[in-house]
Amino acid sequence: MDRTERKVRNQDINPCIEESDASQKCLSAYNYDSRMCSAYFLKYKNCRKYWHGIMLQRRRDGVSPAMPTAVDRQEMLAAIGGKPY
């Protein structure tokens, strides 16, 4: 696994691994017909948008690291009652 791939698969860096894996699995199941997986793509896109907004807000507030760790994200999601996307 090269450096870029490790970074993408790192739970602390990429908050949307679960959504990414689900969309890849859907593509594989439907012989790469992207029309069949649009709901999965939308979930992934909304996940990235949500966590990007969190990251920008933390940067503005001077919080480090800008992206919350996997444990912190789980606590944040539990506090709001689950995934908002």
Image: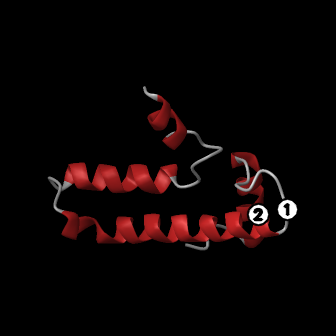
33 left or right of 40 in image: left
Within-10-Å neighbours for mark 2: few <14, some 14–19, many 20+ = some
Q: Quadrant of residue 36?
A: bottom left
Which of 39 and 55 lies nearest the eye of the viewer? 55
| Coordinates of residue 14 in the picture (x, y in percent) | 57, 49
Residue type highlighted by circle 2? Arg
Which of 34 and 4 lies nearest the eye of the viewer? 4
Q: Quick check: 70 above or below 35? A: above
| Coordinates of residue 78 in the picture (x, y in percent) | 74, 62
Q: In which quarter of the image is residue 42?
A: bottom left
Could you tell me which residue is drawn at 51 percent across and 39 percent down?
9
Q: Quadrant of the N terminus?
A: top left
2 left or right of 82 in image: left
Q: Give the residue at mark 1.
A: 62
Could you tell me which residue is drawn at 39 percent across and 54 percent down?
22
State the SS at label 2. Answer: helix
| Coordinates of residue 71 in the picture (x, y in percent) | 74, 47
Q: Give the residue at mark 2.
A: 59
Q: Quadrant of residue 53?
A: bottom right
30 left or right of 65 in image: left
Which of 53 and 81 lies nearest the eye of the viewer? 53
Q: Which residue lies furthest to the right in this view?
A: 62
Q: Would you say residue 62 is visible in this rendering?
A: yes
Q: Quick check: 23 above or below 50? A: above
Contact, mark 2 vs mark 1 (Cβ under 8 Å)? yes
Report, in whole angstroms, how far the alpha carbon at label 2 lies from the one at label 1: 5 Å
Q: Residue furthest top?
A: 1
Q: Quadrant of the C terminus?
A: bottom right
Q: Quick check: 82 above or below 14? A: below
Could you tell me which residue is drawn at 20 percent across and 70 percent down?
35
